[in-house]
Image: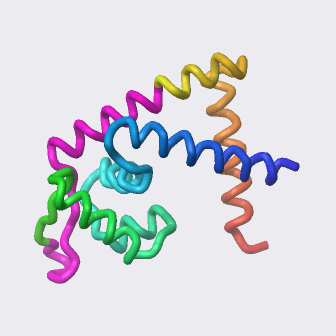
Amino acid sequence: MLIADVYELAGISRRTSEDIAREAGQTAARWHVLSVLSDGPRTVPNAARRLGLTPQSVQRVVSDLLATDLVEARPNPDHARSPLITLTDDGRATLERLFERSDASRARLLARAGTSAEELRTAGETLRRLLDALRTPA
């Protein structure tokens, strides 16, 4: 039952993320890539691993973000053919707007659900422990 609930929650969350992103003139895919770059420059393959996606799909999104000046490519001293992708000032501002919208949406959801942010944090920690156990061979 828990797994079915998690899948349903994930589906609803994806649709909500798409709505929030669309309101800001973005897509959820672009939001995800911007978010993974928020802690520093990454190569496309590294960003793809972090997102659990193929490098080709992340490259398509990065190409869109490059074309709109939300990210930039910098030389990679460790690999000449795999540049480091980093947020521009516009990219950081766009990501901040997306997070603000998401935070407001989450606050409304928690209020409707009668759930506190602490309860949500605890549930997340429990799910991460389950995921870690599932990833570790028995």
Residue 31 in the image: state x and y as whole percent.
38, 49
**Image quadrant of residue 94?**
top left
- Asked if residue 91 is positioned above or below residue 77 in the image, the reply reads above
Residue 22 in the image: state x and y as whole percent.
40, 42
Using the image as rendered, state which of residue 54 and residue 118 is in the foreground: 54
User: Residue at 70% across / 37% down in the picture?
Assistant: 123
User: Residue at 15% across / 81% down in the picture?
Assistant: 80
Determine if the magenta segment contains residue 96: yes
Residue 37 in the image: state x and y as whole percent.
31, 54
- Asked if residue 93 is positioned above or below residue 14 in the image, the reply reads above
**Image quadrant of residue 48?**
bottom left
Using the image as rendered, state which of residue 79 and residue 90 is in the foreground: 90
Count the marks: 0
Residue 134 in the image: state x and y as whole percent.
73, 64
Quadrant position of the C terminus in the picture: bottom right
User: Residue at 71% across / 22% down in the picture?
Assistant: 113
Q: How is the image coloured?
A: rainbow
Q: Residue furthest right?
A: 1
Q: Is residue 30 left or right of residue 114?
A: left
User: Residue at 48% across / 69% down in the picture?
Assistant: 53
The magenta segment is 76-103
Q: Is residue 12 left or right of residue 85?
A: right
- Asked if residue 6 is positioned above or below residue 105 in the image, the reply reads below
Determine if the magenta segment contains residue 90: yes
